[in-house]
Amino acid sequence: MVEFLGDFVFQIVFIGIFYWPGWVVLRTLTAGRYPPSKGTKHNKEFVAVCGLVTLIATIAFIYS
């Protein structure tokens, strides 16, 4: 039950919040090559982590 809740929270909260900022950053850095267009499999966790890292870096830059 705990594993199910952890996966649910990870999928909904982490990927739901940080996927789109990561998508914008990666599309900009890779000139539109990654993440691929809809329907093509790709690593959603990697895209979300890029969004989280970008957010942390932006906050650190603002407050430094």
Image (cartoon, rainbow, N blue to C red):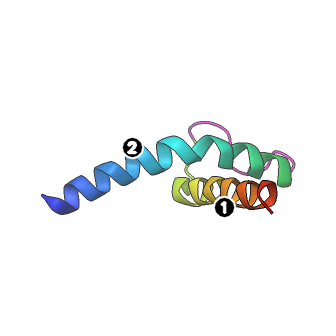
Between 33 and 26, the one lying in front of the other is 26
Q: Which residues are magenta?
A: 30-39
**What is the quadrant of the C terminus in the image?**
bottom right
Instruction: Pick out the residue farthest to the front.
Output: 63
Q: Dot 1 corresponds to which residue?
A: 53
Numbered disc in front, either 1 or 2: 1
Give x and y (percent) for residue 9: 33, 50
| Image-based side of 40 in relation to 6, left or right | right
Instruction: Please determine whether, in this image, residue 3 is positioned above or below residue 27.
Output: below
Query: Is residue 4 something one can see in this rendering?
Result: yes
Magenta-drawn stretch, dominant element (helix, strand or loop):
loop
The amino acid type of the residue labelled 1 equals Val
- Residue drawn at (76%, 57%), measured in percent from left and top? 63
Numbered badge on residue 39: none
Q: Dot 2 corresponds to which residue?
A: 12
Q: For the residues labelled 1 and 2, say whether their Cβ atoms are less than 8 Å apart.
A: no
Earlier residue among tags 1 and 2: 2
Q: Residue 58 lies in what quarter of the image? A: bottom right
The CA distance from mark 1 to mark 2 is 18 Å
Kind of element beneath mark 2: helix
Between 56 and 4, the one lying in front of the other is 56
Kind of element beneath mark 1: helix
**What is the quadrant of the N terminus in the image?**
bottom left
Q: Is residue 2 magenta?
A: no
The amino acid type of the residue labelled 2 equals Ile
Instruction: Pick out the residue farthest to the top.
Output: 38
Q: Residue 4 lies in what quarter of the image? A: bottom left
Label 1: how many Cα within 10 Å (few below 14, some 14–19, many 20+): some
Between 58 and 64, the one lying in front of the other is 64
Give x and y (percent) for residue 38: 61, 36
